[in-house]
Image: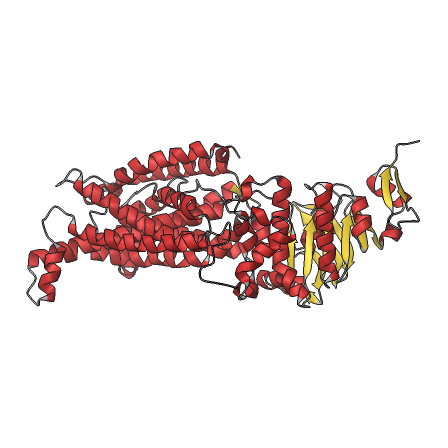
Amino acid sequence: MVALSEAPLAGDRSVRARWLIGVLAALLVTMMALSLTVGAAGVSPLAVLADWLAGRDIGLRERVILGDIRLPRVLTGVLVGASLAVSGTVMQGLFRNPLADPGIVGVGAGAGLGAVLAIVLGGMLPGAVATAVGPHLVPVAAFLGGWGSTLVLYRVATRGGWTSVATMLLAGIALGALAGAVTGVLVYLADDAQLRDLTFWGMGSLAGASWLKLAAAAPVMLAGLITAPALSRALNALALGEAAALHLGVRVQRMKALAILSVAAATGAAVAISGGIGFVGIVVPHLLRLAMGPDHRFLLPAAALLGACLLLAADMMARVVVAPAELPIGTVTALVGGPVFLWILLRKRGLVEV
Amino acid sequence: MLQATGLGITLNRRAILTRVDFHAAAGQMTCIVGPNGSGKTTLLRALTGELRGTGTVTLDGDDLAAMTPEALAQRRAVLPQAMPLGFPFTVLEVVRLGLTGRQALAPDAAHLPMRALERVGLRGFAGRFFQELSGGEQQRAHLARVLLQVWQPVHAGQPRWLFLDEPVAALDIGHQLQVMRLARGFAGAGGGVVAVMHDLNLTAMAADSVCLMARGEVVAQGPVSRVFADDRLSAAYGCPVRVSTPPAEGTPYILPHAAA
Protein backbone atom coordinates (compact mmCIF):
# COMPACT_ATOMS: atom_id res chain seq x y z
CA MET A 1 0.00 0.00 0.00
CA VAL A 2 2.84 2.35 0.78
CA ALA A 3 4.69 2.97 -2.45
CA LEU A 4 7.73 5.15 -2.84
CA SER A 5 6.18 6.98 -5.74
CA GLU A 6 3.07 7.77 -3.73
CA ALA A 7 2.16 11.44 -3.77
CA PRO A 8 2.27 13.10 -0.35
CA LEU A 9 -1.09 13.31 1.40
CA ALA A 10 -3.00 16.54 0.99
CA GLY A 11 -2.09 18.87 3.82
CA ASP A 12 1.03 16.89 4.73
CA ARG A 13 4.06 19.16 4.54
CA SER A 14 6.56 16.81 6.19
CA VAL A 15 8.18 15.73 2.90
CA ARG A 16 8.75 19.33 1.88
CA ALA A 17 10.05 20.10 5.38
CA ARG A 18 12.62 17.28 5.20
CA TRP A 19 13.83 18.50 1.81
CA LEU A 20 14.13 22.03 3.11
CA ILE A 21 16.16 20.89 6.11
CA GLY A 22 18.56 19.11 3.74
CA VAL A 23 18.91 22.21 1.58
CA LEU A 24 19.49 24.40 4.64
CA ALA A 25 22.17 22.02 5.95
CA ALA A 26 24.00 22.24 2.62
CA LEU A 27 23.59 26.01 2.65
CA LEU A 28 25.08 26.21 6.13
CA VAL A 29 28.18 24.25 5.12
CA THR A 30 28.62 26.59 2.14
CA MET A 31 28.15 29.65 4.30
CA MET A 32 30.69 28.42 6.84
CA ALA A 33 33.25 27.81 4.12
CA LEU A 34 32.55 31.22 2.55
CA SER A 35 32.72 32.89 5.93
CA LEU A 36 36.22 31.48 6.46
CA THR A 37 37.44 33.08 3.24
CA VAL A 38 36.03 36.56 3.81
CA GLY A 39 38.11 38.98 5.82
CA ALA A 40 40.32 42.05 5.85
CA ALA A 41 43.49 39.97 5.56
CA GLY A 42 43.84 38.19 2.23
CA VAL A 43 44.19 34.65 3.49
CA SER A 44 42.78 31.84 1.38
CA PRO A 45 41.66 28.78 3.30
CA LEU A 46 41.91 26.77 0.08
CA ALA A 47 45.59 27.56 -0.34
CA VAL A 48 46.17 26.74 3.32
CA LEU A 49 44.27 23.49 2.94
CA ALA A 50 46.35 22.61 -0.12
CA ASP A 51 49.55 23.34 1.82
CA TRP A 52 48.36 21.25 4.73
CA LEU A 53 47.43 18.32 2.49
CA ALA A 54 50.79 18.53 0.73
CA GLY A 55 52.49 18.39 4.10
CA ARG A 56 54.01 21.86 3.81
CA ASP A 57 54.36 24.08 6.87
CA ILE A 58 51.55 26.53 7.42
CA GLY A 59 52.71 30.03 8.17
CA LEU A 60 52.11 31.58 11.61
CA ARG A 61 50.09 34.40 10.06
CA GLU A 62 47.75 31.99 8.28
CA ARG A 63 47.46 29.87 11.39
CA VAL A 64 46.50 32.84 13.57
CA ILE A 65 44.06 34.40 11.11
CA LEU A 66 42.27 31.19 10.22
CA GLY A 67 42.59 29.17 13.41
CA ASP A 68 42.41 31.83 16.09
CA ILE A 69 40.34 34.58 14.50
CA ARG A 70 38.08 33.34 11.72
CA LEU A 71 37.29 29.80 12.88
CA PRO A 72 36.07 30.72 16.38
CA ARG A 73 34.17 33.59 14.84
CA VAL A 74 32.39 31.31 12.38
CA LEU A 75 31.56 28.75 15.05
CA THR A 76 30.33 31.49 17.37
CA GLY A 77 28.15 32.83 14.57
CA VAL A 78 26.69 29.39 13.93
CA LEU A 79 25.90 28.76 17.60
CA VAL A 80 24.56 32.25 18.29
CA GLY A 81 22.39 32.25 15.15
CA ALA A 82 21.01 28.81 15.94
CA SER A 83 20.37 29.78 19.57
CA LEU A 84 18.54 32.99 18.72
CA ALA A 85 16.35 31.33 16.08
CA VAL A 86 15.56 28.25 18.19
CA SER A 87 14.76 30.23 21.32
CA GLY A 88 12.48 32.46 19.25
CA THR A 89 10.70 29.39 17.89
CA VAL A 90 10.30 27.78 21.32
CA MET A 91 9.05 30.99 22.87
CA GLN A 92 6.52 31.54 20.10
CA GLY A 93 5.30 27.97 20.59
CA LEU A 94 5.05 28.46 24.33
CA PHE A 95 3.10 31.71 24.02
CA ARG A 96 1.19 30.38 21.00
CA ASN A 97 1.99 33.57 19.17
CA PRO A 98 4.37 34.39 16.30
CA LEU A 99 5.30 37.77 17.80
CA ALA A 100 6.83 36.37 20.98
CA ASP A 101 10.55 36.84 20.44
CA PRO A 102 13.03 36.93 23.32
CA GLY A 103 14.47 40.18 21.94
CA ILE A 104 11.10 41.88 21.70
CA VAL A 105 9.48 40.77 24.95
CA GLY A 106 12.35 41.76 27.22
CA VAL A 107 14.09 38.41 27.73
CA GLY A 108 17.13 39.65 25.80
CA ALA A 109 17.16 42.77 27.98
CA GLY A 110 16.99 40.60 31.12
CA ALA A 111 19.85 38.47 29.87
CA GLY A 112 21.77 41.64 29.03
CA LEU A 113 21.23 42.92 32.55
CA GLY A 114 22.61 39.64 33.89
CA ALA A 115 25.68 40.01 31.70
CA VAL A 116 26.27 43.64 32.72
CA LEU A 117 25.87 42.72 36.40
CA ALA A 118 28.48 40.02 35.95
CA ILE A 119 30.92 42.36 34.18
CA VAL A 120 30.59 45.21 36.68
CA LEU A 121 30.05 43.38 39.95
CA GLY A 122 31.84 40.13 39.09
CA GLY A 123 35.00 41.40 40.75
CA MET A 124 33.19 41.57 44.09
CA LEU A 125 32.51 37.83 44.17
CA PRO A 126 34.42 35.87 46.82
CA GLY A 127 37.63 34.51 45.31
CA ALA A 128 36.59 30.87 45.59
CA VAL A 129 33.34 31.44 43.71
CA ALA A 130 35.07 33.56 41.07
CA THR A 131 37.63 30.86 40.31
CA ALA A 132 34.95 28.16 40.29
CA VAL A 133 32.79 29.98 37.74
CA GLY A 134 35.72 31.47 35.85
CA PRO A 135 34.94 32.57 32.29
CA HIS A 136 31.43 31.05 32.57
CA LEU A 137 30.35 33.89 34.86
CA VAL A 138 29.01 36.21 32.15
CA PRO A 139 27.04 33.56 30.19
CA VAL A 140 25.65 31.99 33.35
CA ALA A 141 24.60 35.39 34.71
CA ALA A 142 22.97 36.19 31.37
CA PHE A 143 21.14 32.86 31.49
CA LEU A 144 19.85 33.66 35.00
CA GLY A 145 18.79 37.15 33.88
CA GLY A 146 16.96 35.72 30.87
CA TRP A 147 15.34 33.01 33.00
CA GLY A 148 14.11 35.51 35.59
CA SER A 149 12.59 37.78 32.97
CA THR A 150 10.90 34.89 31.11
CA LEU A 151 9.33 33.68 34.35
CA VAL A 152 8.06 37.17 35.17
CA LEU A 153 6.77 37.62 31.63
CA TYR A 154 4.94 34.28 31.59
CA ARG A 155 3.43 34.98 34.98
CA VAL A 156 2.20 38.43 33.96
CA ALA A 157 0.98 37.70 30.44
CA THR A 158 -0.54 34.23 30.76
CA ARG A 159 -3.67 33.32 32.67
CA GLY A 160 -5.02 29.78 32.61
CA GLY A 161 -2.92 28.91 29.59
CA TRP A 162 -4.12 31.81 27.53
CA THR A 163 -1.65 34.58 26.66
CA SER A 164 -2.82 38.11 26.20
CA VAL A 165 -0.64 39.42 23.39
CA ALA A 166 -1.12 43.04 24.40
CA THR A 167 -0.10 42.25 27.98
CA MET A 168 2.87 40.23 26.76
CA LEU A 169 4.19 43.06 24.58
CA LEU A 170 3.56 45.70 27.27
CA ALA A 171 5.20 43.56 29.93
CA GLY A 172 8.13 43.18 27.53
CA ILE A 173 8.40 46.97 27.26
CA ALA A 174 8.31 47.31 31.05
CA LEU A 175 10.92 44.60 31.56
CA GLY A 176 13.13 46.10 28.86
CA ALA A 177 12.88 49.57 30.42
CA LEU A 178 13.61 48.23 33.90
CA ALA A 179 16.60 46.23 32.71
CA GLY A 180 17.81 49.27 30.74
CA ALA A 181 17.55 51.53 33.80
CA VAL A 182 19.43 49.14 36.09
CA THR A 183 22.02 48.68 33.35
CA GLY A 184 22.36 52.46 33.21
CA VAL A 185 23.05 52.64 36.95
CA LEU A 186 25.66 49.88 36.61
CA VAL A 187 27.35 51.64 33.71
CA TYR A 188 27.56 54.75 35.88
CA LEU A 189 29.22 52.70 38.61
CA ALA A 190 31.65 50.93 36.29
CA ASP A 191 35.36 51.75 36.18
CA ASP A 192 37.24 52.49 32.97
CA ALA A 193 38.28 48.93 32.17
CA GLN A 194 34.74 47.66 32.76
CA LEU A 195 33.31 50.45 30.60
CA ARG A 196 35.53 49.28 27.76
CA ASP A 197 34.23 45.71 28.19
CA LEU A 198 30.64 46.94 28.33
CA THR A 199 30.94 49.07 25.23
CA PHE A 200 32.40 46.28 23.11
CA TRP A 201 29.92 43.79 24.46
CA GLY A 202 26.90 46.03 23.89
CA MET A 203 27.60 46.70 20.24
CA GLY A 204 26.29 43.33 19.27
CA SER A 205 29.15 41.85 17.37
CA LEU A 206 30.94 38.62 16.67
CA ALA A 207 34.21 40.56 16.34
CA GLY A 208 35.33 39.68 19.84
CA ALA A 209 34.88 35.96 19.29
CA SER A 210 37.64 33.79 20.68
CA TRP A 211 38.10 30.16 21.64
CA LEU A 212 38.01 31.17 25.31
CA LYS A 213 34.68 33.00 25.04
CA LEU A 214 33.23 30.27 22.86
CA ALA A 215 34.25 27.59 25.36
CA ALA A 216 32.56 29.57 28.13
CA ALA A 217 29.25 30.15 26.34
CA ALA A 218 28.92 27.11 24.09
CA PRO A 219 27.89 24.62 26.81
CA VAL A 220 25.05 26.90 27.97
CA MET A 221 23.86 27.53 24.40
CA LEU A 222 24.10 23.83 23.55
CA ALA A 223 22.12 22.92 26.67
CA GLY A 224 19.32 25.16 25.44
CA LEU A 225 19.57 23.88 21.86
CA ILE A 226 19.58 20.21 22.86
CA THR A 227 16.51 20.60 25.09
CA ALA A 228 14.43 22.18 22.34
CA PRO A 229 13.78 19.17 20.04
CA ALA A 230 12.52 17.16 23.01
CA LEU A 231 9.75 19.75 23.32
CA SER A 232 8.59 19.61 19.70
CA ARG A 233 5.63 17.24 20.08
CA ALA A 234 4.50 19.07 23.21
CA LEU A 235 4.76 22.45 21.46
CA ASN A 236 2.62 21.11 18.60
CA ALA A 237 -0.02 19.89 21.04
CA LEU A 238 0.12 23.18 22.94
CA ALA A 239 -1.09 24.97 19.79
CA LEU A 240 -4.49 23.40 20.57
CA GLY A 241 -4.49 24.97 24.04
CA GLU A 242 -3.26 23.74 27.39
CA ALA A 243 -6.24 21.51 28.16
CA ALA A 244 -6.08 19.74 24.80
CA ALA A 245 -2.31 19.28 25.18
CA LEU A 246 -2.89 17.61 28.55
CA HIS A 247 -5.55 15.36 27.00
CA LEU A 248 -3.02 14.30 24.38
CA GLY A 249 -0.66 13.15 27.12
CA VAL A 250 1.61 16.20 27.52
CA ARG A 251 2.90 17.00 31.01
CA VAL A 252 2.05 20.63 30.50
CA GLN A 253 3.63 22.19 33.60
CA ARG A 254 6.92 20.34 33.22
CA MET A 255 7.03 21.11 29.53
CA LYS A 256 6.49 24.84 30.12
CA ALA A 257 9.23 24.96 32.75
CA LEU A 258 11.62 23.18 30.36
CA ALA A 259 10.73 25.49 27.48
CA ILE A 260 11.42 28.55 29.63
CA LEU A 261 14.78 27.11 30.77
CA SER A 262 15.70 26.29 27.17
CA VAL A 263 14.85 29.80 25.96
CA ALA A 264 16.75 31.40 28.84
CA ALA A 265 19.85 29.26 28.29
CA ALA A 266 20.02 29.74 24.52
CA THR A 267 19.14 33.45 24.57
CA GLY A 268 21.21 34.20 27.66
CA ALA A 269 24.43 32.67 26.42
CA ALA A 270 23.95 34.11 22.92
CA VAL A 271 23.46 37.58 24.38
CA ALA A 272 26.43 37.11 26.70
CA ILE A 273 28.81 36.29 23.87
CA SER A 274 27.54 38.61 21.19
CA GLY A 275 25.56 41.43 22.79
CA GLY A 276 22.19 42.39 21.43
CA ILE A 277 21.50 40.83 18.02
CA GLY A 278 17.85 41.39 17.26
CA PHE A 279 15.17 39.97 14.99
CA VAL A 280 16.79 36.61 14.16
CA GLY A 281 14.36 34.91 16.54
CA ILE A 282 11.33 36.39 14.83
CA VAL A 283 12.31 36.45 11.16
CA VAL A 284 13.63 32.90 10.90
CA PRO A 285 10.67 30.98 12.39
CA HIS A 286 8.20 33.17 10.53
CA LEU A 287 9.76 32.54 7.12
CA LEU A 288 10.05 28.83 7.87
CA ARG A 289 6.41 28.54 8.96
CA LEU A 290 5.41 30.04 5.62
CA ALA A 291 7.62 27.57 3.76
CA MET A 292 6.99 24.33 5.64
CA GLY A 293 4.27 24.83 8.22
CA PRO A 294 4.38 25.13 12.00
CA ASP A 295 5.19 21.49 12.90
CA HIS A 296 7.91 21.93 15.54
CA ARG A 297 9.48 18.55 14.78
CA PHE A 298 10.78 20.11 11.56
CA LEU A 299 10.59 23.78 12.46
CA LEU A 300 13.15 23.55 15.29
CA PRO A 301 16.02 21.93 13.35
CA ALA A 302 15.27 24.11 10.33
CA ALA A 303 15.31 27.23 12.53
CA ALA A 304 18.70 26.25 13.96
CA LEU A 305 20.12 25.87 10.44
CA LEU A 306 18.55 28.99 8.93
CA GLY A 307 19.38 31.06 12.02
CA ALA A 308 23.03 30.04 11.71
CA CYS A 309 23.03 30.81 7.96
CA LEU A 310 21.38 34.19 8.50
CA LEU A 311 23.83 35.23 11.18
CA LEU A 312 26.84 34.17 9.11
CA ALA A 313 25.46 36.14 6.14
CA ALA A 314 24.85 39.19 8.34
CA ASP A 315 28.36 38.89 9.78
CA MET A 316 29.90 38.71 6.31
CA MET A 317 27.94 41.78 5.25
CA ALA A 318 29.01 43.57 8.40
CA ARG A 319 32.65 42.77 7.58
CA VAL A 320 32.51 43.60 3.88
CA VAL A 321 30.33 46.70 3.50
CA VAL A 322 32.65 49.19 5.23
CA ALA A 323 35.89 47.10 5.08
CA PRO A 324 38.44 47.24 6.61
CA ALA A 325 36.19 48.61 9.39
CA GLU A 326 33.14 46.63 10.56
CA LEU A 327 29.47 47.39 11.12
CA PRO A 328 27.95 46.05 14.33
CA ILE A 329 26.12 42.88 13.25
CA GLY A 330 23.04 43.93 15.23
CA THR A 331 22.63 46.82 12.78
CA VAL A 332 22.56 44.44 9.82
CA THR A 333 20.03 42.04 11.38
CA ALA A 334 17.84 44.98 12.42
CA LEU A 335 17.93 46.39 8.87
CA VAL A 336 16.57 43.08 7.58
CA GLY A 337 14.45 42.16 10.59
CA GLY A 338 12.66 45.44 11.26
CA PRO A 339 10.81 45.47 7.93
CA VAL A 340 9.95 41.76 8.23
CA PHE A 341 8.50 42.39 11.67
CA LEU A 342 6.35 45.21 10.27
CA TRP A 343 5.28 42.92 7.43
CA ILE A 344 4.12 40.26 9.91
CA LEU A 345 2.11 42.93 11.72
CA LEU A 346 0.51 44.04 8.45
CA ARG A 347 -0.46 40.51 7.50
CA LYS A 348 -1.72 39.51 10.92
CA ARG A 349 -3.09 42.67 12.37
CA GLY A 350 -5.69 40.70 14.32
CA LEU A 351 -3.00 39.06 16.45
CA VAL A 352 -2.22 42.13 18.48
CA GLU A 353 -5.81 43.02 19.19
CA VAL A 354 -6.61 39.74 20.94
CA MET B 1 -16.65 1.54 34.28
CA LEU B 2 -16.11 5.17 35.16
CA GLN B 3 -16.94 5.98 38.76
CA ALA B 4 -16.77 9.27 40.66
CA THR B 5 -17.45 9.28 44.37
CA GLY B 6 -17.89 12.32 46.61
CA LEU B 7 -16.37 14.60 43.99
CA GLY B 8 -15.82 18.20 45.08
CA ILE B 9 -14.27 20.89 42.88
CA THR B 10 -13.45 24.42 43.98
CA LEU B 11 -12.37 26.99 41.40
CA ASN B 12 -11.19 30.46 42.44
CA ARG B 13 -12.37 29.72 45.99
CA ARG B 14 -15.90 29.04 44.73
CA ALA B 15 -17.33 25.57 45.22
CA ILE B 16 -18.54 24.44 41.78
CA LEU B 17 -19.22 20.79 42.62
CA THR B 18 -19.96 19.44 46.07
CA ARG B 19 -19.94 15.71 46.78
CA VAL B 20 -21.05 14.56 43.34
CA ASP B 21 -21.46 10.86 42.58
CA PHE B 22 -21.41 9.81 38.96
CA HIS B 23 -20.99 6.58 37.04
CA ALA B 24 -20.84 5.57 33.41
CA ALA B 25 -20.55 2.14 31.85
CA ALA B 26 -18.39 1.01 28.95
CA GLY B 27 -20.39 0.24 25.82
CA GLN B 28 -22.86 2.99 26.70
CA MET B 29 -23.39 6.64 25.95
CA THR B 30 -23.89 8.71 29.08
CA CYS B 31 -25.04 12.31 28.67
CA ILE B 32 -24.69 15.06 31.26
CA VAL B 33 -27.42 17.70 30.97
CA GLY B 34 -28.51 20.66 33.04
CA PRO B 35 -28.90 24.43 32.86
CA ASN B 36 -26.00 26.84 32.24
CA GLY B 37 -23.69 27.07 35.23
CA SER B 38 -24.91 23.82 36.78
CA GLY B 39 -21.39 22.34 36.72
CA LYS B 40 -21.62 20.05 33.66
CA THR B 41 -18.32 21.08 32.10
CA THR B 42 -16.58 21.14 35.49
CA LEU B 43 -17.76 17.58 36.13
CA LEU B 44 -16.49 16.51 32.71
CA ARG B 45 -13.11 18.19 33.31
CA ALA B 46 -12.83 16.37 36.64
CA LEU B 47 -13.73 13.05 34.99
CA THR B 48 -10.99 13.52 32.37
CA GLY B 49 -8.33 14.21 34.99
CA GLU B 50 -7.91 17.84 33.97
CA LEU B 51 -9.23 19.18 37.31
CA ARG B 52 -8.30 17.72 40.68
CA GLY B 53 -10.45 18.07 43.76
CA THR B 54 -11.69 16.08 46.71
CA GLY B 55 -13.22 12.64 46.28
CA THR B 56 -12.07 9.93 43.89
CA VAL B 57 -12.50 9.13 40.22
CA THR B 58 -11.68 5.65 38.96
CA LEU B 59 -11.42 4.67 35.29
CA ASP B 60 -11.86 0.92 34.77
CA GLY B 61 -10.67 0.42 38.33
CA ASP B 62 -7.62 2.74 38.22
CA ASP B 63 -7.46 5.86 40.34
CA LEU B 64 -7.27 8.86 38.00
CA ALA B 65 -5.12 10.85 40.44
CA ALA B 66 -2.39 8.20 40.25
CA MET B 67 -2.20 8.15 36.44
CA THR B 68 0.30 10.15 34.39
CA PRO B 69 -0.92 12.30 31.48
CA GLU B 70 0.74 9.83 29.07
CA ALA B 71 -1.07 6.86 30.61
CA LEU B 72 -4.36 8.76 30.59
CA ALA B 73 -3.94 9.69 26.92
CA GLN B 74 -3.75 5.97 26.14
CA ARG B 75 -7.09 5.36 27.84
CA ARG B 76 -9.28 8.27 26.89
CA ALA B 77 -9.70 11.13 24.42
CA VAL B 78 -11.35 14.46 25.13
CA LEU B 79 -13.10 16.96 22.87
CA PRO B 80 -13.03 20.23 24.83
CA GLN B 81 -15.01 23.32 23.94
CA ALA B 82 -13.41 25.14 21.03
CA MET B 83 -10.10 26.99 21.56
CA PRO B 84 -8.50 29.10 18.81
CA LEU B 85 -5.53 27.39 17.16
CA GLY B 86 -2.11 28.95 17.79
CA PHE B 87 -0.47 28.48 14.38
CA PRO B 88 -1.48 27.92 10.73
CA PHE B 89 -1.64 24.11 10.72
CA THR B 90 -3.44 22.32 7.90
CA VAL B 91 -6.48 20.23 8.77
CA LEU B 92 -4.46 17.05 8.28
CA GLU B 93 -1.72 18.31 10.61
CA VAL B 94 -4.27 19.09 13.33
CA VAL B 95 -5.89 15.66 13.06
CA ARG B 96 -2.47 13.99 13.09
CA LEU B 97 -1.87 15.38 16.59
CA GLY B 98 -4.34 12.72 17.74
CA LEU B 99 -1.80 10.01 16.93
CA THR B 100 -0.41 9.46 20.41
CA GLY B 101 1.77 6.84 22.03
CA ARG B 102 2.17 3.47 20.33
CA GLN B 103 -0.35 4.33 17.61
CA ALA B 104 2.10 6.82 16.09
CA LEU B 105 4.56 3.95 15.52
CA ALA B 106 2.06 1.67 13.75
CA PRO B 107 2.99 0.78 10.14
CA ASP B 108 -0.22 2.32 8.78
CA ALA B 109 0.07 5.43 11.01
CA ALA B 110 0.45 7.70 7.97
CA HIS B 111 -3.01 6.74 6.71
CA LEU B 112 -4.91 6.89 9.98
CA PRO B 113 -5.47 10.69 9.99
CA MET B 114 -7.06 10.56 6.53
CA ARG B 115 -9.38 7.76 7.64
CA ALA B 116 -10.32 9.82 10.68
CA LEU B 117 -11.20 12.74 8.40
CA GLU B 118 -13.31 10.43 6.24
CA ARG B 119 -15.24 9.39 9.33
CA VAL B 120 -16.45 12.96 9.92
CA GLY B 121 -16.94 13.68 6.20
CA LEU B 122 -13.99 16.07 5.85
CA ARG B 123 -11.71 14.05 3.58
CA GLY B 124 -11.60 16.77 0.97
CA PHE B 125 -10.55 19.32 3.60
CA ALA B 126 -7.20 17.70 4.52
CA GLY B 127 -5.08 20.24 2.65
CA ARG B 128 -6.98 23.33 3.80
CA PHE B 129 -5.73 25.60 6.57
CA PHE B 130 -7.59 24.80 9.78
CA GLN B 131 -8.20 28.46 10.58
CA GLU B 132 -10.01 28.94 7.25
CA LEU B 133 -12.69 26.37 8.13
CA SER B 134 -16.13 27.34 9.45
CA GLY B 135 -16.84 26.84 13.14
CA GLY B 136 -18.76 23.64 12.50
CA GLU B 137 -16.06 22.22 10.23
CA GLN B 138 -13.40 23.03 12.85
CA GLN B 139 -15.50 21.22 15.45
CA ARG B 140 -15.72 18.11 13.22
CA ALA B 141 -11.98 18.24 12.45
CA HIS B 142 -11.29 18.27 16.19
CA LEU B 143 -13.68 15.33 16.56
CA ALA B 144 -11.70 13.47 13.89
CA ARG B 145 -8.51 14.13 15.90
CA VAL B 146 -10.10 12.96 19.13
CA LEU B 147 -11.59 9.84 17.54
CA LEU B 148 -8.21 9.04 15.99
CA GLN B 149 -6.75 8.84 19.51
CA VAL B 150 -9.07 6.00 20.61
CA TRP B 151 -10.92 4.60 17.58
CA GLN B 152 -8.60 1.79 16.50
CA PRO B 153 -7.81 0.51 20.01
CA VAL B 154 -11.49 0.30 20.94
CA HIS B 155 -12.20 -1.62 17.76
CA ALA B 156 -9.35 -3.95 18.70
CA GLY B 157 -11.24 -4.71 21.90
CA GLN B 158 -9.25 -2.51 24.28
CA PRO B 159 -11.13 -0.40 26.85
CA ARG B 160 -11.21 3.24 25.78
CA TRP B 161 -13.22 6.30 26.78
CA LEU B 162 -14.42 9.31 24.86
CA PHE B 163 -15.33 12.59 26.59
CA LEU B 164 -17.22 15.21 24.60
CA ASP B 165 -18.00 18.74 25.80
CA GLU B 166 -20.98 20.01 23.81
CA PRO B 167 -19.93 18.12 20.66
CA VAL B 168 -22.81 19.42 18.54
CA ALA B 169 -22.83 23.04 19.72
CA ALA B 170 -21.77 24.61 16.40
CA LEU B 171 -23.37 22.05 14.08
CA ASP B 172 -26.39 21.96 11.79
CA ILE B 173 -29.00 19.26 12.28
CA GLY B 174 -27.50 16.85 9.75
CA HIS B 175 -24.06 17.01 11.29
CA GLN B 176 -25.54 16.80 14.79
CA LEU B 177 -26.93 13.42 13.84
CA GLN B 178 -23.64 12.42 12.22
CA VAL B 179 -21.72 13.19 15.43
CA MET B 180 -24.28 11.33 17.54
CA ARG B 181 -23.99 8.34 15.18
CA LEU B 182 -20.19 8.35 15.55
CA ALA B 183 -20.45 8.53 19.34
CA ARG B 184 -22.99 5.69 19.34
CA GLY B 185 -20.74 3.70 17.03
CA PHE B 186 -17.86 4.13 19.47
CA ALA B 187 -20.07 2.89 22.32
CA GLY B 188 -21.30 0.06 20.11
CA ALA B 189 -17.69 -1.08 19.71
CA GLY B 190 -17.40 -1.36 23.48
CA GLY B 191 -16.04 2.11 24.33
CA GLY B 192 -17.51 4.40 26.95
CA VAL B 193 -18.86 7.80 25.93
CA VAL B 194 -19.53 10.69 28.29
CA ALA B 195 -20.96 13.82 26.67
CA VAL B 196 -22.09 17.17 28.00
CA MET B 197 -25.22 18.07 26.03
CA HIS B 198 -27.57 21.03 25.75
CA ASP B 199 -30.10 19.52 23.37
CA LEU B 200 -32.48 17.40 25.43
CA ASN B 201 -34.15 15.85 22.37
CA LEU B 202 -30.86 14.73 20.88
CA THR B 203 -29.95 13.38 24.31
CA ALA B 204 -33.22 11.47 24.54
CA MET B 205 -32.49 9.96 21.15
CA ALA B 206 -28.87 8.98 21.73
CA ALA B 207 -28.24 8.42 25.44
CA ASP B 208 -28.30 5.09 27.25
CA SER B 209 -28.01 6.90 30.53
CA VAL B 210 -28.49 10.55 31.45
CA CYS B 211 -27.20 12.58 34.36
CA LEU B 212 -29.24 15.69 35.22
CA MET B 213 -27.37 18.41 37.08
CA ALA B 214 -28.47 21.61 38.79
CA ARG B 215 -26.56 24.02 41.05
CA GLY B 216 -23.43 21.85 41.22
CA GLU B 217 -25.26 18.69 42.20
CA VAL B 218 -26.51 15.60 40.42
CA VAL B 219 -30.31 15.69 40.58
CA ALA B 220 -30.87 12.28 39.02
CA GLN B 221 -28.99 9.69 36.98
CA GLY B 222 -30.41 6.73 35.07
CA PRO B 223 -32.16 5.79 31.83
CA VAL B 224 -33.73 8.63 29.87
CA SER B 225 -37.26 7.38 30.49
CA ARG B 226 -36.76 7.61 34.24
CA VAL B 227 -34.79 10.88 34.49
CA PHE B 228 -36.72 12.97 31.95
CA ALA B 229 -39.93 13.77 33.82
CA ASP B 230 -41.94 17.00 33.54
CA ASP B 231 -41.56 18.14 37.12
CA ARG B 232 -37.88 17.21 37.45
CA LEU B 233 -36.80 18.99 34.27
CA SER B 234 -39.01 21.99 35.03
CA ALA B 235 -37.44 22.35 38.47
CA ALA B 236 -33.88 21.92 37.18
CA TYR B 237 -34.22 24.39 34.29
CA GLY B 238 -36.54 26.79 36.11
CA CYS B 239 -39.11 26.83 33.32
CA PRO B 240 -42.13 24.70 32.47
CA VAL B 241 -41.09 21.70 30.38
CA ARG B 242 -43.27 18.90 29.00
CA VAL B 243 -42.03 15.44 28.10
CA SER B 244 -44.11 13.43 25.63
CA THR B 245 -43.51 9.95 24.31
CA PRO B 246 -45.34 9.04 21.12
CA PRO B 247 -46.09 5.32 21.55
CA ALA B 248 -45.11 4.58 17.94
CA GLU B 249 -41.53 5.84 18.39
CA GLY B 250 -40.64 5.19 22.01
CA THR B 251 -38.23 8.15 22.11
CA PRO B 252 -39.50 10.97 24.30
CA TYR B 253 -39.41 14.52 23.03
CA ILE B 254 -39.05 17.50 25.26
CA LEU B 255 -40.65 20.89 24.66
CA PRO B 256 -40.77 24.01 26.78
CA HIS B 257 -44.35 25.09 27.10
CA ALA B 258 -45.51 28.60 27.73
CA ALA B 259 -47.26 29.05 31.05
CA ALA B 260 -50.92 28.26 30.48
Q: Quadrant of the N terminus of chain B?
A: bottom right
Percent x, y for residue B15? 72, 47
Q: In the shown orientation, is residue A342 left or right of residue A12?
A: left
Q: In the shown orientation, is residue B50 left or right of residue B241?
A: left
Looking at the image, what colour scheme do you see?
secondary structure
Percent x, y for residue A17? 41, 53
Q: In the shown orientation, is residue A68 left or right of residue B127?
A: left
Percent x, y for residue B223? 85, 55
Give whichever of A214, B189 is nearer the camera.
B189
- Location of residue B60 (image quadrant): bottom right
Give whichever of A144, A322 is nearer the camera.
A322
How many numbered circles are shown? 0
- Location of residue A283 (image quadrant): top left
Percent x, y for residue B118? 62, 53
Residue at screen point 86% across, 39% down: B255
Residue at screen point 46% across, 44% down: A152
Task: Evaluate whether residue A268 shows in this view.
Answer: no
Vertical arrangement, residue B125 with respect to residue A348, above or below? below
Q: Quadrant of the C terminus of chain B?
A: top right
Give whichever of B107, B157 is nearer the camera.
B107
Task: Evaluate whether residue B2 shows in this view.
Answer: yes
